[in-house]
Amino acid sequence: MATRVIPPRILRNLRYNTATKPLNSTHPSSLTPTLSPPTCLDPKPPSSTVLRPAIDPSALNFHDVEKLFSYVPTYKLLRSTAVLHATGVEPMVDLGMWIMKSKFMEIEGVKDIILAAIRGTFYNHFCAGEDAITAGKSIGSLNDGGLRGMLVYGVEDAHDNDGCDRNLKGFMHTVNVSRSLPTSSVSIVSIFT
């Protein structure tokens, strides 16, 4: 199973490194403590008193898997697992890049089928939407599930005034969508030139 995910050359190096390195076999009883416990600390509470930390009900509990994934349908979890596995397999990524750069993308019917497949799998998994409205809906559904998302607006390089105006309009629309998010959300603006 591990060889399907981890390349064999890495496993060989791992076996080599762990098999040839000498172990530090110092016995714990041979170590002598150099520090004594501080005497200024309060004594332990009586054993009948049980102190329990306050549990925040909104915090995620990763040990309760059933509750953690209760709001996500099973088919979405399976699709997410398949997409993440496909993006982790280098030949699959290379095939996808080859298809996107191939002559198939110039044939109208084939291009539509390829883009529909990409939109239904990889794009929907990694992107919240094509515009600020659909991204806002995606972020709202994350918030309803108790999760938080990161809203990033990406623009293409513009060489003319119309392109710059289009980018500014899209950016301002994204800012307006971020205003509709809960007050606990954090907004960060990064502009790269």
Image: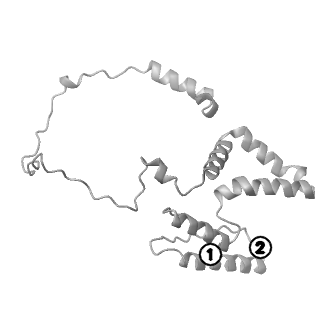
Q: Position of residue 146 (x, y in %)?
A: 48, 63
Label 1 or label 2, whichever comes before in sequence order = 2
Callout 2 amino acid? His
Tell whether 47 sits left or right of 78. Answer: left
- Confirm whether residue 5 shows in the render: yes
Instruction: Report the Cα–Cα distance between label 1 and label 2.
Output: 21 Å
Callout 1 amino acid? Thr
Which residue is rendered at x = 61% and y = 34% of the image?
5
Q: In the image, which disc is placed on residue 159?
A: 2
For discs 1 and 2, the disc positioned in front in the rendered view: 1
Q: Position of residue 70 (x, y in %)?
A: 52, 54
- Confirm whether residue 193 shows in the render: no
In terms of secondary structure, where does tag 1 sit?
Answer: helix
* Residue wearing tag 1: 174
Which residue is rendered at x = 75% and y = 42% of the image?
94
Within-10-Å neighbours for mark 1: few <14, some 14–19, many 20+: some
